[in-house]
Image: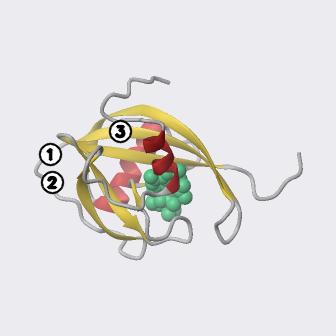
Amino acid sequence: EESRGPPPRVGVGVFVIKGNKVLLGRRRSSIGDSTYALPGGHLEFGESFEDCAMREVKEETGLDIEKIEFVTITNSVFLEEPKPLHYVTIFMRGELVDSQQLPQNVEPEKCDGWDWYNWDENMPKPLFKPLENLVQRGFSPFSADEKL
Ligand code: 8DG
Ligand code: MG
Ligand code: MG
């Protein structure tokens, strides 16, 4: 097959769950600008999915999470972005260590701010494409029981 872009990268997106809500923020990025997405980022060399989830959530929101587990995976090709990109994204979920802890917008150049949203109703729009695709297939981070 003809190559049209750089090799796929591994992204990790994290459903931070509080009661029946998840944490979303509006992206400021060349990929998916102005869309609502989960905290997350790139898997680093030698890192476990759990460690990456914990690190990215801390770096982007200041929140400490626990009970981290795998929920699902997506294979996303972004052809409409300034340059073509391909991500294999591992979706994890976790809960707050301290349910009173508030999210901070640690990287304001990358995100407009974090807030809690119901996964079914009251979901902000537009969602980041890979998340929208999960919604379309009826995925819920609350009922997911896939295991790696
Ligand atoms: P880093 O330097 O902190 O590692 O990267 P980042 O700037 O935080 O990366 P990111 O774009 O937030 O996340 C990496 C990729 O993961 C993203 O470009 C595409 C993929 N990804 C999804 N869904 C989601 C999602 O809901 N949230 C985030 N943050 N990334 C996602 O496919
Ligand atoms: Mg990020
Ligand atoms: Mg990051």
The residue wearing badge 3 is 93
Measuring from the top left, give residue 148's x and y in whole percent. Answer: 50, 24
Placement of the N terminus among the 4 image quadrants = top right
Q: Could you tell whether 82 is left or right of 129 in the image?
A: right
One can see residue 41 in this view:
no
**Could you tell me if the residues under marks 1 and 2 are in contact, i.e. CB atoms within 8 Å?**
yes
The residue wearing badge 1 is 98
Q: Where on the picture, by quarter, is residue 25?
A: bottom left
Q: Nearer the viewer, mark 3 or mark 1?
A: 3
The answer to whether residue 71 is above or below residue 23 is: above
Q: Badge 3: few (under 14), some or many (20 or more) residues near its Cα, within 10 Å?
A: many
Of all residues, the one furthest to the left in this rendering is 100
Q: Amino acid at mark 1?
A: Asp
Measuring from the top left, give residue 90's x and y in whole percent. Answer: 51, 40
Q: Could you tell whether 97 is left or right of 134 in the image?
A: left
Residue appearing at x 15%, y 54% in the figure: 101
- Secondary structure of the residue carrying tag 3 is strand
Q: Badge 1: few (under 14), some or many (20 or more) residues near its Cα, within 10 Å?
A: few
Q: Badge 2: few (under 14), some or many (20 or more) residues near its Cα, within 10 Å?
A: few
Q: Amino acid at mark 3?
A: Arg
The answer to whether residue 26 is above or below residue 70 is: below
The answer to whether residue 84 is above or below residue 140 is: below
First reached walking from the N terminus: tag 2 or tag 3 = 3
Residue appearing at x 56%, y 71% in the figure: 30
Residue 101 is marked as 2
Q: Give the Cα separation between the discs numbered 2 and 3.
A: 17 Å
